[in-house]
Image: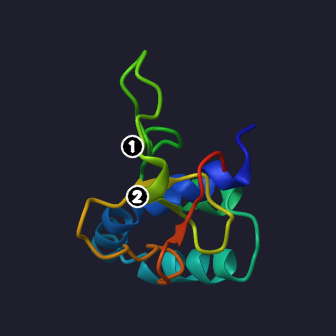
Amino acid sequence: MEDDGHQLGLLCAELTELRDLASRHGLSRALDSLLTAVRAGQQVRDRRIELLRRLGIPAGTTRQPGLRIPGLGDGRPATELYGCPEARCSRTWVRPPGDPVALCSVYGAPLSHRPFGS
Protein backbone atom coordinates (compact mmCIF):
# COMPACT_ATOMS: atom_id res chain seq x y z
CA MET A 1 0.00 0.00 0.00
CA GLU A 2 1.27 3.46 -0.86
CA ASP A 3 2.18 5.69 2.05
CA ASP A 4 0.02 8.67 2.94
CA GLY A 5 2.73 11.15 1.94
CA HIS A 6 2.66 9.78 -1.59
CA GLN A 7 -1.14 9.98 -1.66
CA LEU A 8 -0.99 13.60 -0.47
CA GLY A 9 1.55 14.32 -3.22
CA LEU A 10 -0.85 12.91 -5.80
CA LEU A 11 -3.70 14.99 -4.39
CA CYS A 12 -1.56 18.11 -4.51
CA ALA A 13 -0.54 17.46 -8.12
CA GLU A 14 -4.14 16.76 -9.15
CA LEU A 15 -5.86 19.51 -7.19
CA THR A 16 -6.38 22.05 -9.97
CA GLU A 17 -7.91 19.41 -12.23
CA LEU A 18 -9.93 17.91 -9.36
CA ARG A 19 -11.40 21.32 -8.52
CA ASP A 20 -12.59 21.69 -12.11
CA LEU A 21 -14.00 18.15 -12.27
CA ALA A 22 -15.66 18.43 -8.86
CA SER A 23 -17.30 21.70 -9.89
CA ARG A 24 -18.62 20.18 -13.13
CA HIS A 25 -19.98 17.12 -11.30
CA GLY A 26 -21.49 18.92 -8.32
CA LEU A 27 -18.88 17.49 -5.94
CA SER A 28 -17.13 20.68 -4.81
CA ARG A 29 -18.35 20.11 -1.25
CA ALA A 30 -16.91 16.61 -1.25
CA LEU A 31 -13.52 17.96 -2.37
CA ASP A 32 -13.67 20.73 0.24
CA SER A 33 -14.47 18.11 2.88
CA LEU A 34 -11.48 16.03 1.77
CA LEU A 35 -9.18 19.07 1.98
CA THR A 36 -10.53 20.01 5.43
CA ALA A 37 -9.87 16.48 6.68
CA VAL A 38 -6.35 16.45 5.21
CA ARG A 39 -5.53 19.85 6.70
CA ALA A 40 -6.69 18.52 10.06
CA GLY A 41 -4.09 15.74 9.81
CA GLN A 42 -6.37 12.90 8.77
CA GLN A 43 -5.36 10.18 6.33
CA VAL A 44 -5.57 10.95 2.61
CA ARG A 45 -5.66 7.64 0.76
CA ASP A 46 -9.19 6.34 1.30
CA ARG A 47 -10.78 9.78 1.04
CA ARG A 48 -8.90 10.56 -2.20
CA ILE A 49 -9.80 7.22 -3.76
CA GLU A 50 -13.47 7.67 -2.81
CA LEU A 51 -13.57 11.13 -4.40
CA LEU A 52 -11.91 9.80 -7.56
CA ARG A 53 -14.49 7.01 -7.66
CA ARG A 54 -17.35 9.50 -7.32
CA LEU A 55 -15.84 11.51 -10.17
CA GLY A 56 -15.71 8.37 -12.32
CA ILE A 57 -11.92 8.12 -12.25
CA PRO A 58 -10.43 4.70 -11.45
CA ALA A 59 -7.91 5.10 -8.62
CA GLY A 60 -4.34 5.20 -9.81
CA THR A 61 -5.02 6.62 -13.27
CA THR A 62 -4.30 10.27 -12.54
CA ARG A 63 -0.93 11.81 -13.28
CA GLN A 64 1.98 11.20 -10.96
CA PRO A 65 4.10 13.99 -9.44
CA GLY A 66 7.83 14.02 -9.95
CA LEU A 67 8.05 11.82 -13.03
CA ARG A 68 11.70 11.33 -13.96
CA ILE A 69 13.65 10.38 -17.05
CA PRO A 70 15.06 6.88 -16.46
CA GLY A 71 18.76 6.88 -15.69
CA LEU A 72 19.00 10.58 -14.86
CA GLY A 73 17.92 10.46 -11.24
CA ASP A 74 16.22 13.46 -9.70
CA GLY A 75 18.36 16.09 -11.41
CA ARG A 76 17.21 18.62 -8.85
CA PRO A 77 19.43 21.45 -7.61
CA ALA A 78 19.81 21.04 -3.85
CA THR A 79 19.52 24.73 -3.04
CA GLU A 80 16.21 25.25 -4.82
CA LEU A 81 14.21 22.18 -3.77
CA TYR A 82 10.92 22.80 -1.96
CA GLY A 83 8.24 20.58 -0.47
CA CYS A 84 5.10 20.36 1.60
CA PRO A 85 4.84 23.12 4.22
CA GLU A 86 3.37 20.55 6.64
CA ALA A 87 6.06 17.93 5.84
CA ARG A 88 3.33 15.36 5.04
CA CYS A 89 3.63 15.11 1.27
CA SER A 90 6.24 13.33 -0.84
CA ARG A 91 5.96 15.80 -3.71
CA THR A 92 8.87 18.16 -4.39
CA TRP A 93 9.14 21.31 -6.48
CA VAL A 94 12.17 23.02 -8.00
CA ARG A 95 11.99 26.81 -7.89
CA PRO A 96 13.03 28.30 -11.21
CA PRO A 97 15.62 31.08 -10.76
CA GLY A 98 13.95 34.37 -9.91
CA ASP A 99 10.49 32.89 -9.38
CA PRO A 100 8.67 33.31 -6.08
CA VAL A 101 8.17 30.26 -3.90
CA ALA A 102 4.99 28.46 -4.94
CA LEU A 103 2.04 27.89 -2.63
CA CYS A 104 0.95 24.42 -1.61
CA SER A 105 -2.27 23.50 -3.43
CA VAL A 106 -3.66 21.71 -0.37
CA TYR A 107 -2.59 23.94 2.54
CA GLY A 108 -2.34 27.29 0.73
CA ALA A 109 0.97 28.07 2.46
CA PRO A 110 4.35 28.67 0.81
CA LEU A 111 6.32 25.52 0.12
CA SER A 112 9.18 24.83 2.55
CA HIS A 113 12.82 24.81 1.48
CA ARG A 114 14.32 21.31 1.68
CA PRO A 115 18.03 21.12 2.39
CA PHE A 116 20.19 18.77 0.38
CA GLY A 117 19.68 15.12 1.33
CA SER A 118 16.25 15.51 2.90
For residue 57, side relative to residue 21 (left or right):
right
Query: Disc 2 marks which amino acid?
Result: Glu
User: At 48% across and 63% down in the image, what residue appears?
Assistant: 12
User: At 34% across and 70% down in the image, what residue appears?
Assistant: 25
Residue 55 seen by the camera: no
Query: Disc 1 marks which amino acid?
Result: Arg
Residue 106 point in image, percent of width and height: 51, 74
Answer whether labels 1 and 2 touch (C-beta < 8 Å): yes
The quadrant of the rendering that contains the N terminus is top right
Q: CA distance from mark 1 to mark 2?
A: 7 Å
User: At 67% across and 66% down in the image, what residue appears?
Assistant: 87
For residue 1, side relative to residue 26 (left or right):
right
**Pointer 1: what residue?**
63
Residue 103 point in image, percent of width and height: 41, 77
**Pointer 2: what residue?**
14
Residue 112 point in image, percent of width and height: 55, 71
